[in-house]
Image (spheres, coloured by chain):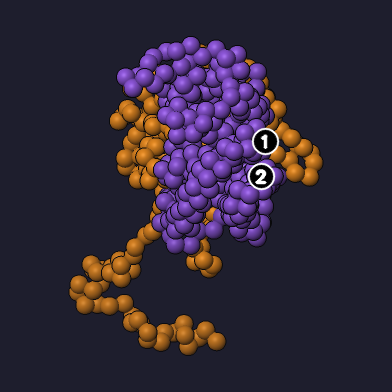
Amino acid sequence: MKPAFSVLFLTTLIGAGQGLFLALFTHQSYALFGLLPMQSDAFYGYGSVLALLFLSGGLIASFFHLGRPERAWRSATKWRTSWLSREVIVLPAFMGVVFLYGASHLLAFRPEVVTLPGGLIIDLSAVLGTLGTLLAFALFVCTAMIYACLRFLREWNSPLTVINYILLGGSSGFILAAFYAAQAAPDQADFFAGWAIIITVLAFIGRGASLWRNARIKPKSSMQTAIGIKHPYITQRSMGSMGGSFNTREYFHGKSAAFLRAIKPAFLLLAFVIPLVLLALGLSAPALLGVAFIVQYFGLLAERWFFFAQANHPQNLYYQTIG
Amino acid sequence: MTQLALVIDLNVCVGCHACVTSCKEWNTSGSAGPLCDENPYDLNPTGTFFNRVQTFEIGKYPHSETLHFPKSCLHCEDPPCVPVCPTGASYKREEDGIVLVDYDKCIGCKYCTWACPYGAREFDEKAKVMKKCTLCVDRIYDMSLPERDRKPSCVKACPTSARMFGDIHDPESDVSQAIREDGGYALMPEWGTHPSNHYLPRRKTKLKIHLDELERADNPLKVDGQLPKPGKGESSMEDASAW
């Protein structure tokens, strides 16, 4: 498939935003149970603002993917059948909850909602945080299922796609949270960096598993089933047009096989290996956490590019020779 | 329930592209607006078409055959492109099974093309919406046309009658009989999309002649033993005098 840059930015930016929000609320949950010192409202509040910036960036990027962005509101109508429609609903809903979560901290408007039997006070921010966490995971699932539900694209049609979207977004967001904490609450940076290392290692395993799986995929469709002729040797002599068509542009990445081969080790290095090294070093040198996030972001862009480029659409069987 | 569809006879398609040009002509002139063309007289002309004719070589030279293969939307009975559409612009008509795009609702996200294993849809780069074969829905129900013209443009244009049009759910229709009796098949059956359009396979017409058909077994001359002279292989006067 052709990697559209709007979609690369959409998925990587909202992934980082979701991950950052999850990191912030994970910290608040730990603090709620007294496992970590509760931070100031400003820490969670401005962290939510940062998450909102990433989510908004992704939302804006998504509009560049549409031929008719002025009709985008229509895309919320078919949520019963379409994962894309579900994503269109969940993304603004999640952004709204992140906004309210951030607002409840920044305005210090945290009325008590319920007191648990142990005397634990659950305030409004904790309720909004829980809701946001659910929506963050729902958004990961919606985004990934857009790809994973297409049974013709066998490279995507796997639970690993969903797992990897969650882990890659989580990794990106927790590294961002570690960098943010290093600036805003330096004594808490290790907590985020520790989780970032764990999630990045899991993401490395998950993405490695999907690469391993995709390298062994046997295509279901063949030239024989595409045109219905039982003969071992079928060669295309003409695709019916000389100057290319939508079909030759949308379904091919347009780069050489050597480029495709080169991008795989590049993204594995940039998205996993280098960030892990920088995170380990970052435990003592916080400035490296920012470098880790930026390097990994480029790695994730490359990862997403490869994710699209590697998917081989069965329609390509009909478009092999110009003629 | 009606399911309109095309049946394409690969045995008689000669690859003339008349269906491609007539389709383009009809559908670029309708009320839905033009099908865009870019660089039409330039180096790399490209545009939106509902129908393409492709050519394949089956086998290896010298034992090879040329196959011309017209390819358009197959109007699947279970169209995978329809449920993924976030706006409902892509839909399958209840009354006749035609899969259509509402150009006024389409947001141009191209998600439906990812979900179609056949690559049947083409994005219009000027109108910025997805377009596809409509089975000439603006023609087949047009009561101002004489009944014989109420057929898709490609069907009317085919000079060898390789394209048939009709209701494949009606067992008595021409298309159903052709599918049933001439081995009609669907493309990529492995995906369970149940395409409505069917293709009739190439068929070799062979005449098998047995030896006893070359020489009459009941020749009356053989019956009474009086064989014609000179006999087979014997020299004749013509042989002697020919030089």
For the point 48% across and 23% down, which residue is it? A129
Residue A145 relative to residue B171: left or right: right
Observer able to see residue A126: yes
Colour in which chain A is drawn: purple
Q: Which chain does the numbered disc 1 sit on? A: A
Q: CA distance from mark 1 to mark 2?
A: 8 Å
Asked where in the image residue B189 lies, by quadrant, the reply is top left
For the point 77% across and 37% down, which residue is it? B39
Specify the quadrant that holds the N terminus of chain A: top right
Q: Which mark is residue A183?
A: 1
For the point 65% across and 32% down, which residue is it? A184
Q: Earlier in the sequence, mark 1 or mark 2?
A: 1
Residue B221 relative to residue A95: left or right: left
Colour in which chain B is drawn: orange
**Callout 1: 10 Å neighbours few (<14), some, many (20+)?**
some
Amino acid bearing label 2 = Pro
Amino acid bearing label 1 = Gln
Observer able to see residue B90: no
Q: Residue furthest left?
A: B224
The image shows residue B208, relative to residue B100, as above or below, that is below
SS of the residue at dot 1? helix
For the point 64% across and 28% down, which residue is it? A50
Q: Position of residue A77 (x, y in %)?
A: 49, 18
Q: Position of residue B90 (x, y in %)?
A: 50, 24
Q: Which mark is residue B199?
A: none
Q: Nearer the viewer, residue B238 or B88?
A: B88
Q: Residue furthest right?
A: B42
Q: Which residue is mark 2?
A: A286
Q: Nearer the viewer, residue A282 or A156?
A: A282
